[in-house]
Image (cartoon, rainbow, N blue to C red):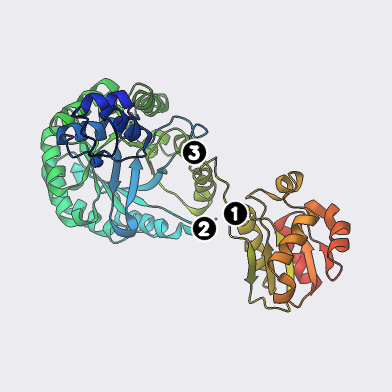
Amino acid sequence: MALKGLDIFKLSPKKNCKECGSPTCMAFSMKVAQGTVSIDACPYFSEDAKTAMREAAAPPMKTIKVGTGDQQYVLGGETVLFRHEKTFVNKTRYAVALCSSMDDAVIEEKLAAIEKVDYDRIGERMFVEMVYVNYDPKSGAVKYMELVKKAAGLNRVLILGVEDPEVARTALDLCKDSKPILNGANASNYEEMNAVAAGAGVALGVSGENDSELYDTLAALEKLGNKNLLFNANTDSIKAAYATTVQYRRAAIKDNDRTCGYPSIVNVAKLARGDNHLQAALLAAFTMKYGSILVADHLDYAEALPLYGIRQNVFTDPQKPMKVEPGIYPINGGDENAICLTTVDFALTYFVVSGELERSGVPCNLIVNDAGGLSVLTSWAAGKFSSSSIAKFFEEQDIAGKIKCRKLCIPGKVAALKGELEAKMPDWEIIVAPKEAVQLVKFLKDMQ
């Protein structure tokens, strides 16, 4: 929550010394509130006052970092309940669950399956970012340590699901440098688990029998000085889990209750109880409703494809169009003699079209027009993808000077532009391509 000028003035030294460049402390406080001046410009603000201001100005949700290097992820830090209000900033991450009670063959199969979900979509890598390693006391600590070692070999962020402080300490000794999450604090062991997590410098996951117990345990850990926390949504029922994630987010953002303002872990595998279709539905639901980390029993390519698509949409800034850089994109070794196709700079359109062109194997040049990041039909309706704008873009980019081929394919959805383009670009043969990108493979092969 942003501080007002009067709030800052109350913490100011009230010296009116003008050393900051402002005539009065009130004027300086107003500039700080507007973000035009740093609080450090005043040499007389006490450290306590600066700390209080930073805490007050921090997002209502705590920002937690887990993992290291390329596998470091930021969780929490949200400032709104709904993405249309501003945007969501730190996307949901997905974990696949392993347990020390599983047979070795099952464990190996699941580890291999995790690595198979790894692909690019609209310039973003989609893969299973985390592995949840659960400890079953019946299987013993030795087998659990072996499982932790195997999971660590995947180079993913580990979530250690263990409530025994001694087992947790031993497991962390194997992987603490990769900054895993220790998920096992509750009302009965939070002091010991806090000591283990703090000693290893890792985030601590907290559970409770109900929301009230969960809140009290979080508050108790805060009193111990630990704010590197995550909370576990209730797994008694889907309704209870949903209520936990929504109510805690609402309390943090609307009521500014910072004890509720931590990232969440939702164990969808427990909620689904082996129902694959239910798991898919719950993964989608909690992606949209405040799950910071979602734990699945398994996640194959067919399940991941729509799920990551949802996540990408939810965590895209609705006020900024997804664009690619306008220009010429040679595909399949396309040169100056290769056929040309043109489309808009909307990222999803580009990646779908370019993917189909690559699949065709036909050398070609994809010419991406500046259409403001809008789709084909939207930009056409807005006048940003018209015969005039295309002709102007070709002239500004000197397309004719860079490419000798004079065959230009336009999207089938704007076939009405064919006549106008032929009039404005008489040196080009205008060809109407199919309406759907998936038809481009056959279209190009037939042209050959």
Q: Residue at x 62, y 50 (%)?
A: 373
Q: CA distance from mark 2 to mark 3?
A: 21 Å
Residue under label 3, please give it. 284
Amino acid beneath label 2: Gly
Residue under label 2, please give it. 123
Q: Position of residue 265 (x, y in %)?
A: 33, 37
The answer to whether residue 100 is left or right of residue 123 is: left
Q: Earlier in the sequence, mark 3 or mark 1?
A: 3
Please tell me whether residue 275 is drawn above or below residue 337 in the rendered image.
above
Query: The residue tagged with tag 2: helix, strand or loop?
Result: loop
> Quick one: 247 or 410, which is closer to the camera?
410
Q: Earlier in the sequence, mark 2 or mark 3?
A: 2
Q: Position of residue 434 (x, y in %)?
A: 78, 58
Query: The residue tagged with tag 1: helix, strand or loop?
Result: helix
Amino acid beneath label 3: Ala
> Quick one: 445 or 145, which is closer to the camera?
445
Within 10 Å of disc 3 (Cα), the crowding (few <14, some 14-19, many 20+) is some
> Quick one: 349 or 97, which is closer to the camera?
349
Q: Earlier in the sequence, mark 1 or mark 2?
A: 2
Quarter where residue 205 is shown? top left
Within 10 Å of disc 1 (Cα), the crowding (few <14, some 14-19, many 20+) is some
